[in-house]
Image (tube, rainbow, N blue to C red):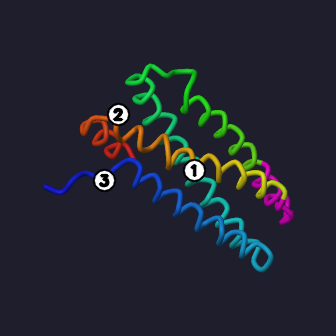
Amino acid sequence: MKSMQSVKDFMEADHDRLDGIFTDFQQTKEKDMQTAKELFEKFKAGLERHIYWEEEILFPVFEEKTGQKNQGPTFVMRQEHTQIRGYLNQIKNKLENGNIETEYEEKGMLNVLKIHNEKEEKILYPWIDQTFTEQDIKNFFDQV
């Protein structure tokens, strides 16, 4: 029987997918504002869905199993999610107003995301895979 995909592999692949969309947005915004807006909306929706999967599906089970609610890695991840959402909204607002000068917000968001994703990929996701039962992992994939 083929082993089930790990949460780490799945979520890392989603990070990579989202990074690609954001890179496309950055490369397009100077040339084609409409396409850039569409790419950013796709990125924003995808990242918000990714955060939802973590905060509403993964983190509660992890916290229950480890007893680390309101502390530990998921507490930090939620704080960083709040920062990331702030940057997403700032970029969205500028683009809606026809302003493509979003470099400051992009840089801030990418700085948070780089460190955030690294902590998830190197620490949190492997910990989740070790902590979750096969059924927990199956439940996660049934909900995504």
User: Disc 2, disc 3: CB below 8 Å?
Assistant: no
Query: Which residues make up the magenta segment?
Result: 90-103
Q: Earlier in the sequence, mark 2 or mark 3?
A: 3
For disc 1, the marked residue is 118
For disc 3, the marked residue is 5
Q: Position of residue 58 (x, y in %)?
A: 43, 36
Q: Position of residue 137 (x, y in %)?
A: 31, 41
Q: Earlier in the sequence, mark 3 or mark 1?
A: 3
Of the pair 128 and 33, the residue shown nearer to us: 128
Q: Residue at x 57, y 21 (%)?
A: 70
**Residue type highlighted by circle 2:** Thr
Q: Residue at x 34, y 50 (%)?
A: 6
For disc 2, the marked residue is 131
Left or right of residue 140: residue 58 = right
* Vertical order, 27 against 5 (above or below): below
Q: CA distance from mark 1 to mark 2?
A: 19 Å
